[in-house]
Image (cartoon, rainbow, N blue to C red):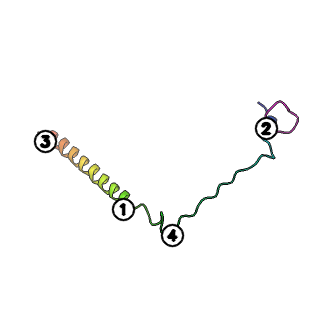
Amino acid sequence: MELDALFGDGKNSDVDTIDPDAEVQEFEEDAPEENEGVGGIGWKMLTLFVCGGLVITALAVAFMVWVIEGLVL
């Protein structure tokens, strides 16, 4: 494929091009209402994050104890 076909210089008529008169759809984003979705990650996500960190830490400590115990014995 040639670059002329990509940019539609008008000489190559057998290539489909984008219609410049096509209708464009515009999407409007709704602004969040007052106090909706504002203020950080939320207490549920924070709780999950802290509990997940504690679980991972407990697993790491248990693995270290298991390895050290295996080396000593």
Q: Which mark is residue 72?
A: 3
First along the sequence among labels 2 and 1: 2
The residue carrying mark 2 is 17
Callout 2: few (<14), some (14-19), or many (20+) C-alpha neighbours within 10 Å?
few
**Residue located at (76% from left, 48% from top):** 23
Distance between mark 2 and mark 1 Cα atoms = 51 Å
Label 3 amino acid? Val
Q: Tell me: residue 29, above or below residue 70.
A: below
- Whether pointer 2 and pointer 1 mark residues with C-beta atoms closer than 8 Å, the reply is no
* Main SS class of the magenta portion in the image: loop
Residue drawn at (80%, 42%) of the image = 19
Disc 4 to disc 2: CB gap under 8 Å: no
- Amino acid type, mark 4: Glu
Quarter of the picture holding the C terminus: top left
Instruction: Find disc 1 in the rendering and name its residue.
Output: 43
Q: Nearer the viewer, residue 14 or 64?
A: 14
Q: Quadrant of residue 43?
A: bottom left
Q: Which amino acid, mark 2?
A: Thr
Q: CA distance from mark 1 to mark 3?
A: 43 Å
Q: Which residues are magenta?
A: 7-17
The disc, 4 or 2, on the residue closer to the chain's N-terminal end is: 2
Farthest right residue? 11
Checking the image for residue 18, the label placed there is: none
Q: Nearer the viewer, residue 51 or 62?
A: 51
Residue hosting label 4: 34
